[in-house]
Image (cartoon, grey):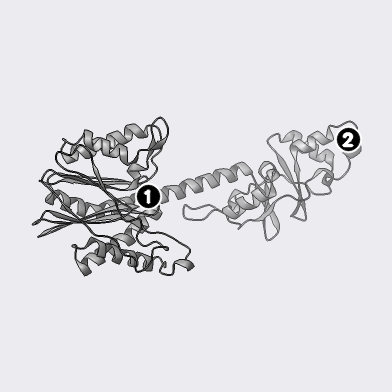
């Protein structure tokens, strides 16, 4: 080895260089045959001229050629360059491992089978082997994955901490409510927000573009935009808040000029303001409807959302959303969820769970307390999903008015 490899050093080709026997053009094929006979572990034999590599002799190919009829008599006393590979992979000792891996792939199978010749200032220092290169690459990738997962795991702690403030406020204000937040991966692109006020409460359920790390980054932008809008305008006009959030997200992502942007990201959402004195709910929806079940109803009513997302490049900067007023009677159940629930594939036909099944499940479980109702809905979804993989992040918010 050329150098000890510390845990902090980035591995280079020299770390894989192993000292080995070599020959020069003056050596005959008989000499090479004798070396391979004495060193059965030797797979390749470097050929050097004045210390510099000029070729590589593969053991299997050499022995197969020299064992052909009359070849030993013809080639025994000739120079060993007759059977050497004249274009082996030669790399400098300081070549980074990742670059070496690319060079090895470009050289083809022979570099993995025969090995590669490592030099320092042009002088041969040792032979590197494909198997060892693969081992180092695998260890390097595993270490990177470990660091990435540690970072993502801690990002999950941060994301859950930011959401826990809203969850605590919801628990304090609403005695009969359910809240489910399940990212598809360790972190997710869904978020919720709940804020308590003297005269009512505000709630938001949002689904940002993507999932995993990209989705989680976008939730930070969208949550910040929503907090700014609430500070500026208050919670009582959900449609106005949507317009404000949309413009802020577009600006943050450089999507104000929709025709000249590399991205087209945003969010779907439901924003709710409940006025405690009147029992009236103000709702604005961006591709996220509400499900309403009133006392005595045999079915579930769908309150449709506007078919326009927030912040996307193709969403006009002056876009507006509709604010709908809903009079709620005691005993009314209201539910909002992201499309991770209704779009989940499952069942015998591998189709989406859908709004119809969700409405039917709400009817089946209508007499349960909301926390139990939420858990029952998730059990129904899990049974329907079966062995299918989770497709998206999922957020579910619901409450019963008392």
Residue 96, how many percent across, how many down? 58, 56
Q: Nearer the viewer, residue 173 or 307?
A: 307
User: Looking at the image, is 132 positioned above or below residue 258?
Assistant: above
Q: Secondary structure under badge 1?
A: helix
Q: Nearer the viewer, residue 336 or 295?
A: 295
Total number of numbered discs in the rendering: 2
Q: Is residue 40 visible?
A: yes
Distance from disc 1 to disc 2, alpha carbons, whole Å, reads: 60 Å
Q: Which is more foreground, mark 1 or mark 2? A: 1
Q: Nearer the viewer, residue 372 or 40?
A: 372
Q: Is residue 183 visible?
A: no
Please give the residue where the numbered disc 1 appears in the rendered image.
150
Residue 49, how many percent across, how many down? 78, 54
Residue 369, how many percent across, how many down? 15, 38
Residue 350 lies in what quarter of the image? Answer: top left
Pointer 1 local density, CA inside 10 Å: few below 14, some 14–19, many at least 20: few
| Mark linked to residue 53 | none
Q: Nearer the viewer, residue 28 or 220?
A: 220
Pointer 2 local density, CA inside 10 Å: few below 14, some 14–19, many at least 20: few
User: Looking at the image, is 136 positioned above or below residue 199?
Assistant: above
Q: Residue at x 79, y 35 (%)?
A: 63
Residue 299, how many percent across, how many down? 22, 38
Q: Residue at x 40, y 29 (%)?
A: 348
215 on left or right of 70: left
Q: Secondary structure under badge 2?
A: helix
Q: Residue at x 40, y 52 (%)?
A: 210
> Contact (CB < 8 A) between labels 1 and 2?
no
Please give the residue where the numbered disc 2 appears in the rendered image.
71
Residue 357 lies in what quarter of the image? Answer: top left
């Amino acid at each position: 080895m050329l150098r000890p490899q510390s845990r902090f050093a980035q591995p280079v080709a020299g770390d894989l260089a192993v000292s080995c026997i070599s020959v020069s053009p003056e050596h005959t094929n008989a000499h090479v045959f004798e070396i391979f006979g004495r060193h059965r572990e030797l797979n390749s034999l470097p050929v050097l001229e004045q210390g510099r590599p000029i070729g590589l002799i593969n053991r299997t190919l050499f022995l197969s050629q020299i064992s052909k009829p009359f070849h030993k008599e013809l080639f025994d006393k000739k120079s060993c360059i007759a059977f050497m590979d004249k274009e082996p992979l030669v790399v400098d000792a300081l070549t980074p491992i990742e670059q070496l891996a690319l060079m090895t792939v470009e050289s083809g199978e022979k570099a993995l089978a025969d090995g590669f010749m490592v030099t320092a200032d042009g002088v041969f220092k040792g032979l590197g082997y494909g198997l060892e290169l693969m081992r180092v690459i695998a260890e390097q990738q595993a270490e990177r994955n470990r660091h990435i997962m540690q970072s993502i795991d801690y990002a999950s702690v941060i994301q859950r901490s930011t959401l826990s403030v809203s969850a605590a406020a919801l628990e304090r204000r609403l005695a009969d409510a359910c809240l489910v937040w399940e990212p598809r991966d360790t972190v997710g692109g869904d978020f919720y927000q709940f804020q308590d006020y003297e005269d009512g409460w505000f709630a938001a359920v949002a689904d940002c573009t993507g999932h995993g790390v990209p989705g989680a980054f976008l939730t930070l932008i969208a949550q910040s935009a929503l907090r700014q809008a609430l500070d500026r305008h208050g919670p009582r006009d959900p449609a106005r808040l949507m317009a404000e959030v949309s413009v802020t997200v577009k600006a943050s992502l450089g999507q104000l000029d929709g025709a000249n942007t590399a991205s087209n990201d945003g969010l779907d959402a439901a924003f709710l303001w409940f006025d405690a004195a009147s029992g009236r709910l103000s709702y604005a929806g961006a591709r996220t409807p509400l499900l309403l079940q009133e006392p005595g109803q045999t079915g579930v009513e769908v309150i449709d959302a506007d078919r326009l997302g927030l912040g996307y490049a193709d969403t006009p900067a002056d876009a507006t959303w509709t604010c709908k007023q809903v009079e709620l009677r005691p005993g009314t159940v209201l539910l909002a969820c992201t499309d991770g629930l209704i779009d989940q594939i499952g069942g015998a036909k591998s189709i989406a769970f859908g709004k119809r099944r969700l409405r039917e499940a709400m009817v089946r479980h209508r007499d349960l307390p909301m926390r139990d109702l939420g858990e029952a809905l998730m059990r129904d979804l899990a049974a329907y999903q079966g062995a299918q993989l989770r497709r998206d992040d999922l957020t579910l918010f619901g409450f019963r008015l008392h």
